[in-house]
Image: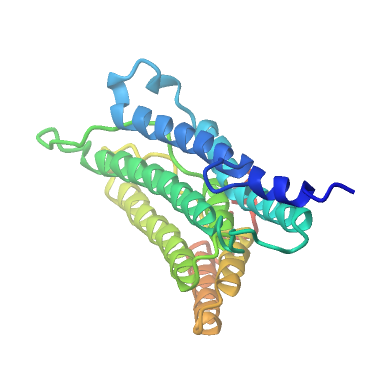
Amino acid sequence: SDPWATRRRSESISVGQLSHAELKFNSIINESAALLRELSLGNESMSSSTLQLMDFDKVMTELSQFHSLVDSEEARRNQSTHGFSYGHTKNEKAPLKHNASDTCLQLLDELESNYDVIFENSMLSANADSNSNAVKHPKLIPNAVSYNLALHALAHSGKGRRVALDAYSILNRMIDRCKKYIIAFEKVATDGTDMKLPPPPPEPSIITYNSVIHAISKSGANDAGHLAEEVFSLMENWKNECEERNGGSDCADYKGNGDND
């Protein structure tokens, strides 16, 4: 056997050398930055008219699966060095998972913000004197998949209690947007106002609730049990509101239909 083989292996993964995970992460970050740049330019960009949700879904999928690449790379390193770190700590690549999750959440946040502008403009459209905000991209809105990808990335980020709080916040935002849309929809129906509403925001589905609870359970937060109970409470309350509003019928997306968007 080669007595210097282990030393050469340790040198090949020296701190100054970018790993496959780091190279992949840099590539995804560049894709994310390009999407955000195009979104911010709006109609000033020649390519913004072709910017679609699938572009965001592609990058968010890569970000949500990035933890697998980091974990497999860490496992290979441990196997090649027989458990010896040679200067590398077990959690050395943890910041990559954190940053991947943060980037995925940023993309979701920008999609939500874009939808909010679209929705606010529709509310102001009946007032000819209103000064509406510029719509970055009038047809680019998040769907249930966007939320579930962000939740998956969050669950595997290893950011502790922040994971639980962020997951709970995402669910609350989904429900709040749905309630806001329902109020506007009922106003149009009853008042006959000249208002053209955008497509409704996605309702949380069973997959969404399970994703939130999964993220909370993996967070390791001391109050994870309490937060999970709060999620069940939100789920039950939203279900009851839907049934009451629909005369006993369940929400269309509550059973998971929203994930087929």
* The C terminus sits in image quarter: top right
Q: Residue at x 71, y 53 (%)?
A: 77
Instruction: Return the x and y of residue 3 as percentages of the image width and height.
Output: 82, 51
Left or right of 229, for residue 173: left
Is residue 199 placed above or below 105 in the rendered structure? above
Observer-nearest of 166 and 54: 166
> Which residue corresponds to the image point at 49% horizontal and 84% vertical from the top-left?
223
Across the whole image, how many numbered discs are drawn on residues?
Answer: 0
The answer to which of 46 and 196 lies nearer the viewer is 46
Name, please, the residue furthest toward the top: 46
Residue 219: quadrant of the picture? bottom right
Which quadrant of the structure image shows residue 82?
Answer: bottom right
Give above or below for 213 relative to 74.
below
> Do we see residue 121 in this rendering?
yes
Residue 31, given in percent of the width and then of the height, sits at 48, 32
Q: Decide which of 174, 216 is in the foreground and name it.
A: 216
Residue occupying the far left of the picture: 129
In this rendering, does residue 57 appear at all? no
Q: x and y percent of residue 253 in the render?
A: 58, 54
The residue at 45%/26% (across/down) is: 51
Relative image position of residue 88 (x, y in whole percent): 59, 58
Task: Pick whichever, 129 or 20, lies toward us.
Answer: 20
Determine whether, in the image, residue 173 is placed left or right of residue 217.
left
For this orientation, the residue located farthest to the right is: 1
Q: How is the image coloured?
A: rainbow
Residue at x 60% of width, y 44% of height: 21
